[in-house]
Image (tube, rainbow, N blue to C red):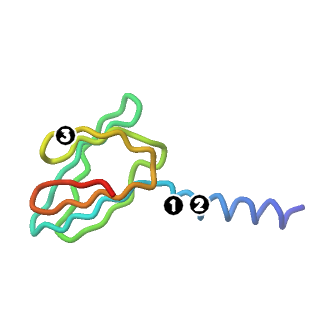
Amino acid sequence: MKKVLLAVMALSLAAGPALAATVVNRDAEARTLIVTEGSDKSELTIGAGESVDFCPGGCFVTMPNGDREALTGGETIEISGGAAKIR
């Protein structure tokens, strides 16, 4: 029984990041996204060439150009030329 419980916990931890959204900044300068999860709003700064996982439980994201999108997890946002595209 202990082994089964440990296996389930390990799988749960491994599956968590797979449900998160990812942002990749292909620009030569840092970019900032505004992330709203529930009633919490925060700024997420992504350095040049950096990739960050975020938003594991769904959120709203305000892109560098002001566009706002709803994410459920699993999406990838690519920032290039100051513009963001969701893939």
Residue 65 marker: none
Q: Which quadrant of the structure image shows residue 74?
A: bottom left
- Circle nearer the N terminus (3, 1): 1
- Circle nearer the N terminus (2, 3): 2
Under tag 1, what secondary structure?
Answer: helix
* Image location of residue 70, percent across then percent down: 35, 39
Under tag 2, what secondary structure?
Answer: helix
User: Dividing the image into 4 quarters, which one contains the C terminus?
Assistant: bottom left
Q: Residue at x 21, y 64 (%)?
A: 25
Residue behind mark 3: 67
**Which amino acid type is marked by label 3?**
Asp
* Image location of residue 4, percent across then percent down: 83, 63
**Which amino acid type is marked by label 1?**
Ala
Residue behind mark 2: 15
- For mark 1, does the 10 Å Cα neighbourhood hold few (<14), some (14 to 19), or many (20 or more) residues? some
Does residue 85 appear left or right of residue 31 in this picture?
Answer: right
Under tag 3, what secondary structure?
Answer: loop
User: Dividing the image into 4 quarters, which one contains the N terminus?
Assistant: bottom right
**Which amino acid type is marked by label 2?**
Ala
Near-viewer residue (82 or 30) = 82
| Residue that lies at the very extreme toward the right in this rendered image | 1
- For mark 2, does the 10 Å Cα neighbourhood hold few (<14), some (14 to 19), or many (20 or more) residues? few
Q: CA distance from mark 2 to mark 3?
A: 29 Å
Q: Residue at x 14, y 61 (%)?
A: 30
Q: Is residue 9 above or below residue 68?
A: below
Contact, mark 1 vs mark 2 (Cβ under 8 Å): yes
Contact, mark 2 vs mark 3 (Cβ under 8 Å): no
Near-viewer residue (83 or 60) = 83
Residue behind mark 1: 18
- For mark 3, does the 10 Å Cα neighbourhood hold few (<14), some (14 to 19), or many (20 or more) residues? few
